[in-house]
Amino acid sequence: MPKPLIHGSRGVVPASKLLEVIGATIDNIRKEDKLTWADVGAAIGRSDDQAAKYAEGTATMDAPTFLRACNSWNGRFANPVFALFNLHIEEQSARNVGDVPHLLLGMTHLSASLQQAMLDQQLDDDEVVAMQPYIEVVGGLVDYLRKRLADAMARRAEAKHG
């Protein structure tokens, strides 16, 4: 019997996994940016206690709060969560690729990190987390190139039929 359409080919992501990823992501951002819980709470429009509860996974984040977090931290916050659904958000600035050498360097670092990590034929969570800065840089470049490709294909189709 086929899966119900509501789940598509991605299957179901348990709420507990969502809470875990949201919590870990908020806590990582707090630590990386040296923020207090009050800073985190202010960024998402909640109290410091509530922000800490999100990080602990003991509170469910509502949609407006989730979107405020996306607005505050862009893909750093949203993409680990969206990755559970094979999704990714693109920041508007990712469409403007100005520093090509920086992006190519990011690709080189990601490639080298992947090669090093795969020496034992396995890619563990710590290795992937360590690659996050390079994944974000390369992801932005790929998003930009996908957008350019879609635009180029649309122009070609328009020229052919126009």
Image (cartoon, rainbow, N blue to C red):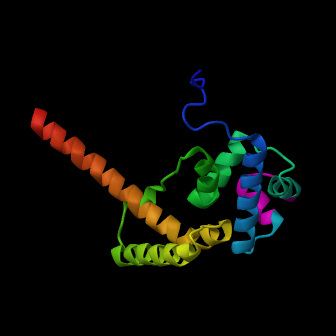
Q: Is residue 50 above or below residue 154?
A: below
Picture quadrant of residue 92: bottom left
Asked if the stretch drawn in magenta spans residue 44, the answer is yes
* Quadrant in the picture for the C terminus: top left
Q: Name the residue at 46% across, 61% down.
A: 139
* Residue 143 position within the rendered picture, expressed as x and y whole percent measured from the top left: 41, 56
Q: Name the residue at 47% across, 78% down.
A: 112
The overriding secondary structure of the stretch rendered in magenta is helix
- The answer to whether one can see residue 52 in this image is yes
- The answer to whether one can see residue 162 in this image is no
Picture quadrant of residue 124: bottom right
Picture quadrant of residue 127: bottom right
Q: Is residue 153 above or below residue 107?
A: above
> Left of 3 or right of it: where is 64?
right
**What residue range appears in magenta?**
38-48
* Residue 140 position within the rendered picture, expressed as x and y whole percent measured from the top left: 44, 62
Q: Name the residue at 58% across, 54% down.
A: 79
* Residue 121 position within the rendered picture, expressed as x and y whole percent measured from the top left: 56, 70
Asked if the stretch drawn in magenta spans residue 55, the answer is no
